[in-house]
Image: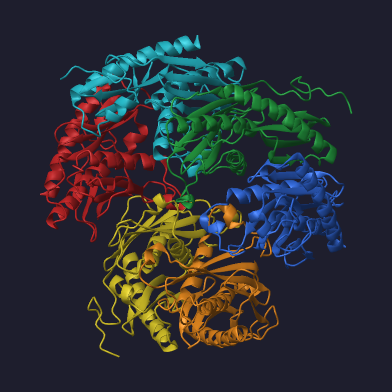
Chain colours: A orange, B blue, C green, D cyan, E red, F yellow
Amino acid sequence: MSQLVRPSGRPFDQMREIVLETQVTRYAEGSCLAKFGNTHVLCTASWENRVPGWMKGQGRGWVTAEYGMLPRATHTRGRREAAAGKQSGRTQEIQRLIGRSLRSVCDLAALGENQITIDCDVLQADGGTRTASITGGFVALSLACKYLVDEGVIPANPIMKQAAAISVGVYQDHPVLDVDYPEDSAGEADMNVVMSSDGGFIEVQGTGEERPLSRAELDEMLRLAEKGCNELFAAQRAALA
Amino acid sequence: MSQLVRPSGRPFDQMREIVLETQVTRYAEGSCLAKFGNTHVLCTASWENRVPGWMKGQGRGWVTAEYGMLPRATHTRGRREAAAGKQSGRTQEIQRLIGRSLRSVCDLAALGENQITIDCDVLQADGGTRTASITGGFVALSLACKYLVDEGVIPANPIMKQAAAISVGVYQDHPVLDVDYPEDSAGEADMNVVMSSDGGFIEVQGTGEERPLSRAELDEMLRLAEKGCNELFAAQRAALA
Amino acid sequence: MSQLVRPSGRPFDQMREIVLETQVTRYAEGSCLAKFGNTHVLCTASWENRVPGWMKGQGRGWVTAEYGMLPRATHTRGRREAAAGKQSGRTQEIQRLIGRSLRSVCDLAALGENQITIDCDVLQADGGTRTASITGGFVALSLACKYLVDEGVIPANPIMKQAAAISVGVYQDHPVLDVDYPEDSAGEADMNVVMSSDGGFIEVQGTGEERPLSRAELDEMLRLAEKGCNELFAAQRAALA
Amino acid sequence: MSQLVRPSGRPFDQMREIVLETQVTRYAEGSCLAKFGNTHVLCTASWENRVPGWMKGQGRGWVTAEYGMLPRATHTRGRREAAAGKQSGRTQEIQRLIGRSLRSVCDLAALGENQITIDCDVLQADGGTRTASITGGFVALSLACKYLVDEGVIPANPIMKQAAAISVGVYQDHPVLDVDYPEDSAGEADMNVVMSSDGGFIEVQGTGEERPLSRAELDEMLRLAEKGCNELFAAQRAALA
Amino acid sequence: MSQLVRPSGRPFDQMREIVLETQVTRYAEGSCLAKFGNTHVLCTASWENRVPGWMKGQGRGWVTAEYGMLPRATHTRGRREAAAGKQSGRTQEIQRLIGRSLRSVCDLAALGENQITIDCDVLQADGGTRTASITGGFVALSLACKYLVDEGVIPANPIMKQAAAISVGVYQDHPVLDVDYPEDSAGEADMNVVMSSDGGFIEVQGTGEERPLSRAELDEMLRLAEKGCNELFAAQRAALA
Amino acid sequence: MSQLVRPSGRPFDQMREIVLETQVTRYAEGSCLAKFGNTHVLCTASWENRVPGWMKGQGRGWVTAEYGMLPRATHTRGRREAAAGKQSGRTQEIQRLIGRSLRSVCDLAALGENQITIDCDVLQADGGTRTASITGGFVALSLACKYLVDEGVIPANPIMKQAAAISVGVYQDHPVLDVDYPEDSAGEADMNVVMSSDGGFIEVQGTGEERPLSRAELDEMLRLAEKGCNELFAAQRAALA
């Protein structure tokens, strides 16, 4: 195994600079601009005093997510999904993941019959947009829940623990933490890991399209992800303080 | 006619604070974050070395525009158009207007067989998103054209003159300049005016749904629009300097 | 400025022959075949004893419009929008204009919770289809309102004044009234003006894609539009007599 | 079996008044306004000097059809298909039938690589719109073919024989010819029959949703259809003379 | 008329081997795998204790059908309709036919406010998929109705008589029974006939795209269809015994 | 931790009965009916001598997959996606997974410019449809590749190793192998694991919506998945022998 040199010069277990800027828009009940290096995602949390039709009358709430990418968030312009007339399979897959992840740390019964929609819009993309969305989306969701408590809509905060996500990859046969776009394009495999702040794994999505992963690699990648998520939990706490 | 008090406290002929921040994204050939007070529109210009099929082989270029609004750019969350599966009539009307306006100040023959797409994405909306889109879109387009000249793609800059746009309305029976959302919701009529820097009118779109406009009101509104556009032309020149 | 010769031989301020034929279909509560020269638009007004969901319980009515063009209304066949699976941006823009214009002369409270839908279907197109639609649509709407009063559905006619529309253009540097297709294709600019019979301007939509309009041209075009609309108001009154 | 009294007062084997008015639009290569009593269908034939992709290079032409109904062609307004975003199953079924029927009397090899599109738009509906469409569509197609010969596009007329269509139904247990809307709504069964002028059956589509048809009824209905189509062939010849 | 040799070697009036296998899926209230030779259609009947909105409160039930073909049911793979985003005109035409045919033998009042949906999915296609769908769909419907009676949902079986369908064609100028794919591609004309077990004709859909049918051919084809349907009625009774 | 009793009575590490029936359809170049207990998926492999547009001229082939579920494959009828007009996010997510998994064991360069489409249609669903699709899809793909070699289309078999997939879950706090529908609905977490026959992990998709997974659970689930995939590899080899 040769000496690893990442395109960004980072050590194998170092994340990009993480910035979680809060309350960045005027109207949303909660918002966070999540920056993982050059990946910038604007996350807003919008409250509605209703739930989807299939949930009515159960006294429980709902958290859902939508994801989008501005057409020129990327190196070359992509087609605007609204103009194309549909969301791609990739977009739907990502927004389902964000929604599942955030619901898993929220006590939906404590939310009452309220719905919070997390919009994650990628302003600039350099790899890891879905993990930045989950990490920033959690901050926006927390702020919105705090708003609901402050406004007396619900008696107690339904957030049970934190959720954060990071990607780990295999680049030149080395597991690496927080994969950016150059690594992702050249990498052999990558895995998105969503964790809760009590050390549990909410989602693990690993793909080895270039080559399968060995069990040893999987283990090391999970270990790196734990390290990364712990740093993200600290950043979230600082942002919400 | 009573003494006019605008919700914002501005005099009838005063615009909101105008900010045209350039090169705000990493990848686009030109970009501008246009702020008209609390209305914030991210404008990017994307270059492609091809033209639409129906223009091939004519030696001329094309400038087109797309418009979108983040779901929570507004007071209450709107439906994401990509999820709805289509762009609304309003969206299409606006992006057609932006495209026509910008094409009218660009020498398409001098652009060669290149296409520039202006994406105008509203991050926050407080009235006047289409006029901010045109004004900021012009800056992004200019930067992209300069890039094409600098890179040797085309020999000379195809921009012939500036284009800018402002809205004028009738609020409590007074013509007012640069209508914001509170005025727009309560106003009797409004007009979007797109001008070129040689004093010409590119587009005039006036609507009096609450009540028709008199000829005298129309005249005063056009005069206010000229004043506003002249200030915008100055701001554009400063941003591009 | 050279001597103007319009393709049709008309003087600059002369409209095409205007025919407003009423009650041309068996079933509609009101109908009008509007002919502006070779432009023929079939306008029907359909009554329903209900309003859109978002208006329920307010005691007010609604007037809306839909616009379509038969595929071979034009020189070369266009794609059928129903087959294409959507209405074009142009179609939506036009039908929104027709609806806004007609609502502005109708007292929606006096209409009660009734909806009138104006369908404007272009059988043959030679320029000016949207202005013929508005002018003929007003006649169909008036007949339907009269029907509702005659049938005892509502106590009084909700029509407050007339609405009519005409296009004015710039052809070979001369402002001209009632632009037909040959003038429109070759013209420098055009403007659609919707007026109310009390002399007010309901909508002004001017576009100078070939070149911007000077303020003097705008003024002359508005003057021509007033002349044209006054002739249309007379024709409407004759048709409805 | 009681004495039959049809809503229209017609004898069981009498058709409505048939009018086939030709060249009713300015632009189409062929056109016909087909009136079967109060059912009015505007049929246009549009020529294009190309064939669909899958036919290219075979030296043969194509005839296809599209069908539409104006929203207020009927007693109560129907939804505009372009606004609904798709053509109904009924519409598609009808336009496929029109296309098949007209292709069957046209020598596609003699048409060369040309396509003729027949648009059948129902202005007013009182039953039998598909049979009026086929009957009038044939006239429009014939005129367009004559135009192509006259213009020297093709050397000889590709029309081999006439095609016409009529509906027959069972009303109060009696087979009746040329079913109108009141009979159709109350009838037990109906059948659309498309014939060629050499006495052949191109299409037979009989449906007995209320009750099945006996073999004897089927035989009598086919006999009535033959009578009706012979009258239509005469009307077509007169219109084309 | 030459001696007829069918591609399959069958005599002109012989059907393919017919298999109607019942209760082939675990969950459906009724199911039947209908095999007409190499044409295999899986028919399921699904019960819901509700009716479509427009039928509510009338005390009557509804029977409807949907049809689909697996992409590789055919010689070359066809496009998946769900991926294409719509059902073809052909699919809609077929499922409307199946629904109408099955409703015609079912007493909808006796069904109460219940809906039964017949799904006909073609696993393998060799001609005659719509007739196999109707024949097998009837068996699935009957089993579901029996289930509803057995479960006490309705007091009596609403099936009034049997429905079955067969195709007849003209191959090398001979009328033939039960057309398979090789005959269908090479044939001159074909007709789908749906009959009820009391000898009535529910639907007759004959098409002569290659050449029109003579009256004598029509008569012989109807006679063959009667023979075929009688054999299918026997097979249905055996399957349901 | 209480004694585990699975709904099916199986031990925690026992799979359902696996059947991989080959060549079950007449036309596909490869096919396999994969049964994991009551989950039945029909997998077909269709060859086309072309590649998608974006791959042309690279000399490499493509393997893609589509997934569908018959409406009544499940306990209650689901909406037909073709009728709904689009594939759900879940469907797209699954078919992207199948495609990625199968491409990862196929040498696309050795496939030449050929495309193989794997259609996975669920006839009956009892949990684990995506893993049955991958496992059966591999068999269909292998048969199609063998066909291409036998027919001389490509010189050597591009399949490099086997791919198979299994789901593992957590039921009543115990990791269990091959989750069926009753376990899935009641389970706390589940994970789909795709492996290659050389012991590598192609995809790992674990979700803990009810509660996060501990690292120890993840490890045990991966171990069970390895056991299950090894049994599936043996079943595939037997089926292909």
- Please name whichever residue, E224 or E63, is drawn nearer the observer in this view of the structure: E63
Q: Quadrant of the C terminus of chain F?
A: bottom left
Please state the horizontal and vertical placement of residue D84, each as a whole percent of the image. 48, 44
Instruction: Answer above or below: position of F12 versus D211.
Output: below
Extreme front residue here? B2
Extreme left residue here? E241
Residue under the image location 83 percent in, 47 percent down: B110
Instruction: Answer above or below: position of B148 versus E214.
Output: below
Instruction: Answer above or below: position of F66 versus F170.
Output: above
- Please name whichever residue, D116 or C135, is drawn nearer the observer in this view of the structure: C135
- Please name whichever residue, A122 or B125, is drawn nearer the observer in this view of the structure: B125
Extreme bottom residue here? F1
Examine the rendering and report whether any part of residue B84 can be seen.
yes
Relative placement, left or right, of E142 versus B84 is: left
Q: Quadrant of the N terminus of chain F?
A: bottom left
- Please name whichever residue, F155 or C207, is drawn nearer the observer in this view of the structure: C207
Please state the horizontal and vertical placement of residue D16, each as a whole percent of the image. 36, 16
Residue under the image location 55 percent in, 62 percent down: F109
Specify the quadrant of the image occupied by residue F185: bottom left
Examine the rendering and report whether any part of residue C187 can be seen.
no
